[in-house]
Image: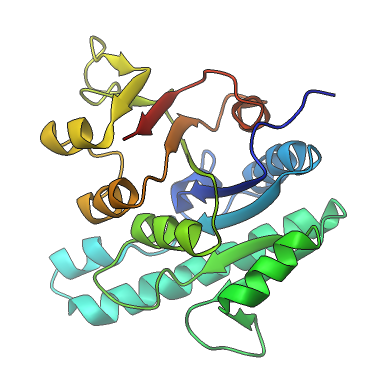
Amino acid sequence: MPAARYKRVLLKLSGEALMGDLAFGISQEMLAYVAEEIQSIYELGVELAVVVGGGNIFRGVSASSHGMERTSADHMGMLATIMNSLALQDALEKGGIQTRVQTAISMHEVAEPYIRRRAARHLERGRIVIFAAGTGNPYFTTDTAAVLRAQEIHAEVLFKATKVDGLYDADPVDNPDAKLFDDITYMEVIEKQLRVMDMTAISLAMDNHLPLVVFNLKQKGNIKRVGCGEAIGTYIHN
């Protein structure tokens, strides 16, 4: 069995990653696929935390642009991330992996409250921890929450799983000549305004020297290969 390069990792998944071929909601087939991919890196002995977005159910920024008050819209988006987190927990536990959901919005009957030291203990005991509800504050994305939680649990790296092969200088869906970056600095990402994450998340990662790997989730085995240190996708660092 190949050896893992990292001891502790935070994986960021978009809500759209759970849609599969659906236009909305959660695809059970895609959910099972994602759980299987996560299990492949977990079995290497990596301590793994996950942050899931909520865009497949509700996107606060989009709703606010259509007239909804931003704070209300963002709170609804946080609830969507909790729904995704519970679905992912169920899929992982069907595979025999102990999982805990911790939420930044208190709902004791549904999930644990986010407590940093408790999250660290879960990881040390071999449980996957899913962080839900973003930071618990409006105006902050789940990308920023992912970087924040990665710092708080002392993750060595943040994996951002996407639907493309890495970070490009343009949208590869619209521009077939878009250039894929193998290696790039956070400052270059900011200067070029590359939208791999919002600028708050990028700045927070840069200030705290947290490396980021962007790769294609839909390529089977990629999570495990990235966890073993293979040069896949885009490596973003200082």
Rendered-image quadrant of the N terminus: top right
Instruction: Left or right? Give the position of 221 relative to 172.
Output: right
Vertical arrangement, residue 32 with respect to residue 137, above or below: above
Rendered-image quadrant of the C terminus: top left
The percent position of residue 175, horizontal first and vertical second, equals 22, 17
Name which quarter of the figure residue 43 lies in: top right
Vertical arrangement, residue 5 with respect to residue 17, above or below: above
The percent position of residue 178, horizontal first and vertical second, equals 24, 15
Q: Residue at x 84, y 50 (%)?
A: 95
Task: Identify which residue, 14 or 202, lies in the foreground.
Answer: 202
The answer to whether residue 194 of the structure is visible from this angle is no
Q: Residue at x 53, y 88 (%)?
A: 106
Q: Residue at x 21, y 22 (%)?
A: 169
Q: How many marks?
A: 0
Name which quarter of the figure residue 172 lies in: top left
The percent position of residue 9, horizontal first and vertical second, equals 59, 47
Task: Identify which residue, 71 or 213, lies in the foreground.
Answer: 213
Task: Identify which residue, 56 or 204, lies in the foreground.
Answer: 204
The percent position of residue 208, horizontal first and vertical second, equals 35, 52
Q: How is the image coloured?
A: rainbow
The answer to whether residue 82 of the structure is visible from this angle is yes
Q: Residue at x 40, y 25 (%)?
A: 234
Vertical arrangement, residue 174 with respect to residue 40, above or below: above
